[in-house]
Amino acid sequence: MSPPDHAEAGGPPAGLPENAFRPLEPGEVYHPLVPASASPPEVTARTIVQGVIWSAVFSAAATYIALKLGQGIESAIPIAILTVGLSSVLARALGRASTLLENVNVLAIGATSGIVAGGSVFTMPAVYILGLEGRSGFWQIFIVPLLGAVLGVFLLVPFRRYFTHDLHGRLPFPEARATTEILVAGNRGGRSAVVLAWSAATAAVYDFAGPSLKLFADTFSTAAIGALAGFTERTRAVFSMNTSAAIFGLGYIMGVDYAAIILAGSMVSFFALVPLFAWFGPHLAGVLPPAAVPLAGMPAEAIFATWVRPIGIGGIFAAGVISILKMSPVIVQAGRQAVAEVARLARGGAVAATARTDRALPMSVDLLGIAAVGLAVAAYFRFSVLAGEPRATALALVATALTLGVAFLFAAVSAWAIALISITPISGMTLTTLIITAVALSALGLSGPSGMLQTLLIGGVVCTALSMSGSLVTQYKIGHWLGATPRTIEVANILGSVVASAATTAVIMLMASVYGFTPDAAHPAALPAPQPNAMAAVLRGVMGSEGAPWFLYAVGAVFAVALELCSVSGLAFALGMYLPMELNSPLVVGAAVAWLLRRSSGDGAVAAARHDQGTLIASGFIAGGALVGVFAALLKFVEDRTGATLVPELTRLPGVGPWLAGWSNWSGLLAFALLSLGVYTVSRRAAPEGNPTP
Amino acid sequence: MEATETRSLPENAYLPLAPGQVYQPVVPASASVPESTWRSVLWGVFLCVIFTAASAYSGLKVGQVMEAAIPISILAIGLGRVYKRRSTLLENVIITGIGGVSGSVVAGAVFTLPALYILKLDPHPWQTIFICIAGGMLGVLFLLPLRRYFVRETHGQFPYPEATAITEVLVTGEKGGSQAALLLQATGIAAVYDFFVTTFQVWKETIDLRFLPAVEGLAQKARMTLSFDALGFILGLGYVMGLRSSLLLCAGGVLSNLVLVPLIWFIGSHVPEAVYPGTKAIAGMDANQIFRGYVRLIGVGAIATAGIFGILKSLKIVVGSFAIAVKAFRAGGEQALERTDRDVSVMTILAGVVVSALAVAIFLGNLGVTATVLLVGLLLVLLFSFFFTSVAANAIATTARNPVSGMTMLTVIVSSVVLLEFGLSGRTGMFFVMAIAGMVCTALSVSGQTVTDLKVGYWLGSTPREQERVKFLGVLVASAVAGLTIVLLARYFQFGEAAPGDTRTVLASPQASLMKVLVEGFMSHQPVAYLLFAIGAVIAVIMEMLSIPALTFALGMYLPLELNSPALVGGFIAHFLTRKSERVGGDAGRTMRERGVVIASGLLAGGALGGVFGAALRMIPGYSEDWIKLPFYDTESISQTVSLLAFAALCLYLWFASVKREPAATR
């Protein structure tokens, strides 16, 4: 996801040296904001407490959004804003404002959240989808992202100087730049934090009132409109729209181009393919596999889930592979650089650093760390996953070698991609890992549930490692610009990943228990979890025994290729095809509000200020909405276990209840319209910096 | 009179203009060069008659209408050298303009009118001829207000493959020198290549690789088939269209053939009965039948919807265009405009539309229907002609292909449904609907050709008014000849399928047979496959949402994949050649690009010539495709491999002949 547009400003922000963003002349040295000679407090109790809190909170939010919508969320920027904002509160409470470097360290602990969540949410839920949860508990799911994250840190450590010093000014680092600007411009961050806090609170209340309290329907649907009943019955074309604030915020940040592609995917699914299937219904007396009931009587959602979704999965898969192919020049380049750098270090290129701003984990510790992770991975595979399989030791060694080798390559690629364009094709690289691993392990005779679990875990480790290295390179650069000690950043990241892994795993397990990830009898309203479903489909196909809907996958894959021919992002489109319409349509509303705000004034600065204000509110919406979603799931979990009613449903109230229920479809739409209008009006009041707010 | 000195096309001929930049044609607006002289008009009419008659025959027999405009431009160059005073560039434009009408009028006529005979409705010869004339006139009249938009305002945005080829032929032919030799060479190669491949059984024209077990398995199990029509003509077309358009075209083809066809088969193979509009169970259909039976209708829906978007987008400029013309008219003539922007006056156009409308009304009135039906019918003719005119112009400008039969199908369907509401049915209804379809079909076919012609004129510096005047003449001549040919052929042959008890030879006329099935179905109250059209419409809307040119994509969905895939190869060659030429830079790079366009135009021209020869040969009694047949022709694996290699050789020729530097151009 793209960060807000602070990075669009021309030169370096006030405070940063003039040569921060340009290549250095020969002999010229970059002096960071906090000089190497100074040593202000970096790691203190407050950084650890704050970092851990933010890490836990944002991990939970990111996990929820990724399971529901298949999108990663931006956590570094909101954390930076909140940290800066809290700084002034802490100044009053503790008598000293946080130092710049303390804030960098809060960020280093906290920002792991999005990363670990991204790594583990894309893979681990597949454990449940494949029905393997009996073989893995909390600790197993917890250890995978943790090992991956730690591995990611250790793998990137040797390249730090290369990315930050040698390439200084040559790589854009869009996200690091935006975050640095927020940290430096302290008091602006203070005001932003307030906006972020109240918008998160608004979203939390709003998203609790709708889905949980049933004050209004959380989904508007044309299927619920009496006047359209005949049309719906004939064509099965249904338009629906979720009314949640979190999705609105996500759409706002996504922007109109990307949101339109996603909605387009949904339209193909719901307005073209579902009606096409339904059209044949009356002619079809028998059962069309893989369904178990005749097509003629199925509602749109069932047709979608049975046949159209697998098409979307095929599309996600193909788009992932295509994204890797497109990245192949970067992969080759990154691989070559990595090997050259390793060779240089092996020749003794690593000089013992003396300056504080150049003090990192020593090479020996780093190598030991990698070896330790390797051992841990091997032991985990040998004695937990593969225990009982023939040739377990050999297989475990191969699996470990695969993990380390692929992780090394992709970690380098991911760091490059983040430095260049601030996006990394995580799902594509993970799918590639899964395929390579599955084929290799099948060749060695491993298949069935153990094979699938083993492959998935390797995927999980690699996926987290590569996300981690992408995040760490950003933080290295922030630290380089501001003058932090690299070693504290490295340690902070490892600490953060422990917290984030725990939080992510807890949320995944909670969601698996309350909602599930594939619709079945026990979980009719499952969370979509697109990437894990695609991963599970691949594994089932390569290693499982049951027949996969290959035909539909293939059709979906071709569809994605056709879109790439039109230079449309196949991944976004396929995600759109896979996700239900109601989750995609509100994205466009959010994106449209962003588009309107950007064009709301002829004065570029005014329009940008309004748009930035909206971005803050949208970030707050995402966080608030996601957290309340997790909270609601928790309440439901407790309700299911205890049988007690914790959340009263307003529709059950005598008197107003039936009235609320009867109008809920329209009241939901109205509430969402008011929310959108509210964001627009409030953001319009923002003025560029320096001008008083009218 | 002296022929003015001829020059090559300016640098910005194929590029969008920078703000404030003006395109200066080859013959500047200030020069006044003979255009419509006796020589050019008479030769144009003569060629028009010949090509119309030949084309009508070929169209009825095999459903292929000849590509007339490019061969006529080549003939015009040759003719010009016979005279003492060489014809001017602009005279040649006129000859091409009149002659080129032939193919388009024929396409309109043979796709519809034979249905009247197949249905045994016995049209009077005058009725047949009138339908052609009315349609052709409407096509030209409705296109004229759009000229400024399609030709001038959007300069450089549409590739205009066919117009490019004609222009290159006319300019290089006139100029002579090494480029002309290159053009001649490419034309010759493609003419021989396409002639032999399409006329005789030398090697397989279409490559589908189904001799490979894996590919055949895919076709059997999933109805996923790839096909590739290895012709020089399409290669050249793809080159001129460019990579972006050919990618979109191909993407549409992929969606139709590799997504929708397999999906329909996936569902349909479990359906025991035939699903309308198909006539047999889907389980027994091959990929091509599924494509023609169902997916094409989705494509038609997409084309129509994309067309509406196109009209909405061009509306502002059309209105502006009218405003300019009206203002100029009020200001006392159009002297204010420069020569190369002077159209036939707005009043003439309006008068023409009114007269045509009255004539159509009288014609339809004679068919014995109520006044309401008459009015509705008239309205349908005018609306459809107007609407499809711009769709056709857009399609031709982008891909050089006109979705004539798709648009005509839509006309038949909508007219039938509407007129049924007004109580029209039975044999009168069929005649009425087919008459409407015939006019609309001719109109849209002619308008596509006219926009090509006007673009050629714009590039070269013709006076639009001169071109437009002779266009009417051309339509008149071509319609009369086409109508007469059909009337004559109907006397000695029968169309469609052999009727019981009729021993006359059968001319297949495939498109008209399709229309006949449709109109018969509707007039006897069959259900309509609205859903397929609606799905197409949704797809077009989605493409607009993604800012993809929806019409190009929709055309790709509608046209058979084998015609789209070779264009992609041409598009890629163009792309890489442009990149290489940019690396080389300077004059050498410029020459490279020029040579590429000249060769591609030569391939187009040669392919068209080869097609004309082939059609001419088919008129010889006793003609048979195996007159020339290579021994390995029936062995798919060898035959297709040879075809593939030959096509690859053609690509290599296109590439290396383009990048080759002339001795003078070396550093």
Image: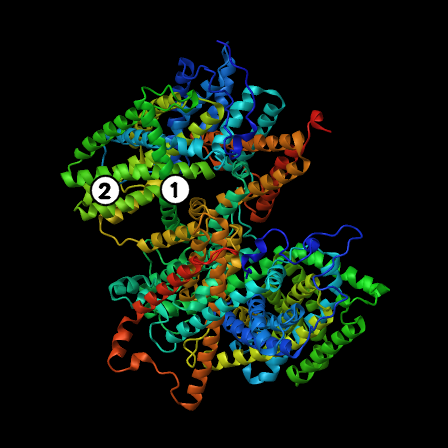
Q: Nearer the viewer, mark 1 or mark 2?
A: 1
Name the amino acid type tagged 2: Met
Give x and y (percent) for residue B411: 30, 43
Identify the residue at horizontal 40%, vertical 72% (top origin).
A206
- The figure's colour scheme reads rainbow
Residue A327 is drawn in which quadrant?
Answer: bottom right
Q: Which residue is mark 2?
A: B430
Q: Report the front residue among B87 and A416.
A: A416
| Mark earlier in primary sequence (1, 2) | 1
Residue A312 shows in this picture: no
Identify the residue at horizontal 25%, vertical 44% (top origin).
B415
Give x and y (percent) for residue A266: 43, 61
Q: Secondary structure at mark 1?
A: helix
> Left of A231 or right of it: where is A465?
right
Give x and y (percent) for residue B623: 45, 32
Disc 2 chain ID: B
Quadrant where the C terminus of chain A sits is bottom left
